Image (spheres, rainbow, N blue to C red):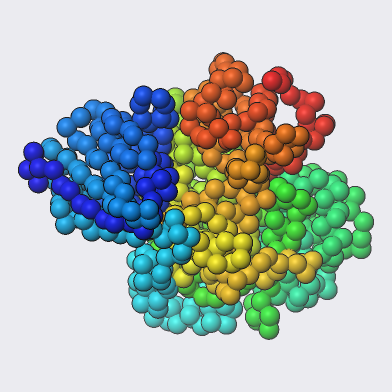
């Protein structure tokens, strides 16, 4: 393209100009219709006499992302907008609407991009512009008409194939050359035990008997030692009359005995109920009464709590700290036979409790992985390799912590555990054990980022390639700050206890669009559906439904989640952009209607967390006599920072629509997070917690 050349393209859309302006005049919507524009943030809204100023990220290829500020140099609502680069006004893009009749409008696109980097030349060629406009016009037409995209118009179909699974497993080293006899025995063990935690560690002990398997603050163990100890523990529990399909409750922090308990119960065929260490005594009693375990295995830290639970069940200690604790699993192991056990007819299951952020925790029955495709799905998006040291800081009672254990098992990788999370201890562990990966929840990563630079700089993290996060949303501001500090190593998995995973954002996705939940791994499908379970139009928000082979089997109380065909509801609302990235707008039950407008708290929280003075923020709907509902914001300021309620409202008004501005702003010293980092919003309106507010405006 020559420096003085202007590329022009035209398309006729089947809507009047006034309707089209809702898209053309809203730059934040462009990524939903133009795949090359991955992100657009309005820095200054349009005002009388001038158009908006925006921060735009352009991503013509997955490996290339550029960021620039643009101004609407010409802004005539309903008619014309001309975007111009703030740093280079020779580059501009004009979007003009020319009415043809009452129902048709011609969209005229003109573009001039002199001095463009050669890697972008294909993006602005006449053919590329015309083809891009044709596709964008198709999406906009169907969006405004309320029609879903046709299957042939949709992007990638993320299917799992046998060849793709094998390629992923070979690339990760899960499948690799080895001693023929050991490989045969390993395959035999996996076929007999299935893709369970017990089967994985049995197979790893055959394939890599002397390799390190587990390491916590007290001890390190090889795969053979883990196999022998879990045989003994399983035999000891069987001698205590624990049988296949019995339930065993576990209340542990992250340590070797916790993992070995899961393996031993798997070898017995017993179901394990994973209790959240942050639960109150009354909640523990409620869960135990509901699930009726024959045994409760708990760290001594929780001995007093377990002693309060009524019931005739075996009580054992998993982490001995005093002589007053219950009999320990180590004592059982020392006195038991190491005879290998045979697989039970029905594999033992894991029951994970939901987070309980909107009500009491419920037990969710996790399915047994169907085979190697389960590991391949995660490894296709998170490039771990055989033997990579993995530190799992996420709680093992949480689905994400369990995923870390299962991935380490499949890769025959040394698994490092720290019983109580401390940000500096996590960095020290990563450095000393030369770990390649960290599995954590967002609040842990925030605490690491909050460490002074001199503290972070003490530790050699050159081996760390992957920081994998899940459990709650990452703000765009945090994503940018973390990757600027630690490099492009951040991976974010969106999912839930019930659906396992839905999508994974890799560093390229997060650089392109910091708030994205990413893309589906192979074997997973995401659909955005309306209230009648129909696909929504392109770019529209709706309920997020997920299909994969790891959908949960139902709650232990008999309940489940809505399903449509082979898809399950996540309870969230979101949308897909034009490049098939998923974005989560918020929980469906958090949406409020204020003055007739649908409003989600999450975009407001994102805008608040982008303020350098704000450390943490939560927004929720409250009753309003005039508007039905309104938003209330709870804000934690950084140390030494100063803001007042009007500063908050003014900032939100700059970023979002008028009805998203919170009427109430509360400055508080802290927010109530659960053990996986989610803010427990129902607590915010509790009178006892409210008494801790420092200021109210």
Q: Say which quarter of the image contains residue 670.
A: top right
Q: Position of residue 638 (x, y in %)?
A: 56, 23
Residue for point 52% across, 54% down = 541
Q: Residue at 85% across / 55% down in the picture?
A: 286
In the picture as drawn, the residue positioned furthest to the front comes out as 101
Please tell me which residue lies in front, 472 or 371: 472
In the rendered image, is residue 155 in sight?
Answer: yes
Residue at the spot x=63%, y=52% of the render? 588
Residue 47: quarter of image? top left
Q: Would residue 441 appear left or right of 665 to someone viewing this image?
A: left
Q: Is 384 on the left or on the right of 254, as rendered?
A: left
Q: Is residue 445 above or below residue 576?
A: above
Residue 43 seen in the figure: no
Give the percent coordinates (x, y) of residue 104.
34, 55
Q: Looking at the rendering, which quadrant does residue 444 occupy?
A: top right
Q: In the rendered image of this protein, does residue 392 appear above or below residue 687?
A: below
Q: Quadrant of the C terminus?
A: top right
User: Across the whole image, how many numbered discs are drawn on residues?
Assistant: 0
Horizontal side of residue 135 vs 518, given as left or right: left
Taking the image as shown, residue 474 lies to the left or right of residue 551, namely: left
Measuring from the top left, give residue 198's x and y in whole percent: 61, 70
Q: Residue sitting at 72 percent across and 34 percent down?
A: 626
Front-most of residues 152 and 73: 73
Of the pair 560 and 200, the residue shown nearer to us: 560
Q: Is residue 538 above or below residue 164?
A: above
Across and down, in percent, residue 310 comes to: 92, 56
């Amino acid at each position: 393209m020559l420096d003085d050349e202007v590329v022009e393209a035209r398309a006729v859309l089947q809507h009047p100009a006034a309707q089209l302006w809702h898209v053309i005049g809203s730059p934040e919507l462009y990524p939903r219709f133009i795949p090359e524009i991955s992100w657009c943030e309005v820095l200054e809204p349009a005002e009388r006499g001038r158009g908006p100023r925006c921060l735009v990220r352009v991503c013509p290829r997955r490996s290339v992302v550029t960021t620039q500020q643009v101004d609407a140099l010409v802004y005539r609502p309903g008619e014309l907008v001309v975007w111009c680069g703030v740093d280079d006004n020779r580059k501009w893009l004009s979007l003009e609407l020319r009415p043809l009749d009452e129902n048709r409008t011609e969209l005229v696109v003109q573009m001039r991009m002199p001095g463009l980097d050669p890697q972008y030349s294909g993006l602005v060629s006449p053919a590329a512009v015309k083809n891009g406009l044709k596709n964008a016009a198709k999406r906009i037409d169907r969006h405004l008409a309320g029609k879903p995209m046709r299957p042939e118009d949709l992007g990638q179909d993320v299917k799992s194939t046998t060849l793709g699974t094998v390629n992923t497993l070979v690339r990760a080293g899960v499948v690799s050359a080895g001693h023929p006899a050991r490989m045969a025995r390993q395959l035999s063990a996996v076929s007999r035990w299935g893709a369970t935690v017990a089967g994985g560690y049995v197979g790893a002990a055959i394939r890599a008997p002397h390799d390190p398997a587990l390491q916590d603050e007290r001890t390190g163990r090889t795969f053979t030692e883990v196999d022998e100890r879990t045989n003994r523990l399983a035999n000891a529990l069987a001698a205590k009359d624990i049988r296949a399909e019995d339930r065993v409750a576990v209340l542990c922090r992250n340590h070797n005995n916790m993992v070995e308990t899961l393996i031993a119960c798997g070898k017995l065929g017993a179901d394990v109920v994973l209790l959240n260490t942050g639960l109150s005594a009354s909640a523990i009693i409620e869960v135990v009464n509901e699930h009726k375990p024959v045994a409760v295995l708990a760290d001594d830290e929780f001995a007093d709590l377990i002693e309060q639970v009524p019931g005739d069940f075996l009580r054992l200690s998993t982490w001995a700290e005093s002589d007053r604790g219950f009999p320990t699993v180590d004592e059982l192991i020392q006195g038991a036979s190491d005879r290998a056990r045979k697989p039970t007819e029905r594999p033992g299951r894991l029951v994970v409790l939901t987070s309980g952020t909107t009500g009491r925790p419920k037990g969710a029955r996790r399915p047994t992985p169907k085979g190697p495709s389960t590991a391949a799905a995660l490894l296709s998006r998170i490039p771990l390799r055989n033997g990579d040291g993995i530190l799992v800081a996420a709680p093992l009672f949480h689905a994400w912590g369990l995923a870390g254990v299962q991935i380490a098992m499949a890769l025959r990788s040394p698994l490092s555990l720290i019983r109580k999370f401390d940000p500096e201890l996590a960095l020290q562990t990563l450095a000393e054990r030369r770990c390649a990966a960290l599995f954590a929840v967002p609040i842990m990563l925030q605490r690491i980022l909050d460490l002074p630079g001199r503290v972070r700089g003490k530790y050699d993290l050159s081996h760390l390639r992957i920081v994998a996060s899940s459990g709650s949303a990452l703000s765009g501001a945090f994503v940018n700050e973390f990757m600027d500090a630690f490099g492009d190593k951040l991976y974010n998995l969106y999912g839930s206890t019930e659906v396992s995973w839905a999508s994974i954002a890799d560093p390229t996705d997060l650089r392109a669009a910091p708030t994205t939940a990413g893309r589906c791994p192979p074997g997973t499908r995401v659909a955005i559906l309306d209230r009648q379970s129909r696909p929504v139009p392109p770019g529209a928000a709706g309920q997020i439904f997920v299909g994969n082979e790891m959908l949960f089997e139902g709650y232990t109380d008999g309940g489940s989640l809505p399903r449509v065909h082979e898809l399950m509801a996540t309870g969230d609302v979101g949308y897909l952009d034009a490049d098939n990235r998923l974005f989560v707008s918020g929980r469906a039950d958090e949406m409020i209607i204020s003055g007739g407008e649908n409003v989600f708290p999450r975009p407001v929280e994102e805008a608040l967390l982008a303020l350098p003075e704000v450390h943490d923020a939560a927004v929720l709907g409250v009753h309003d006599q005039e508007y039905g509902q309104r938003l209330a914001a709870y804000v934690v300021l950084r140390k030494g920072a100063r803001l007042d309620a009007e500063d908050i409202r003014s900032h939100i008004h700059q970023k979002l629509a008028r009805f998203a501005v919170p009427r109430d702003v509360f400055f508080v010293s802290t927010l109530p997070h659960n053990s996986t980092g989610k803010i427990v919003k129902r607590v915010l309106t509790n009178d006892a917690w409210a008494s801790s507010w420092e200021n109210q405006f």
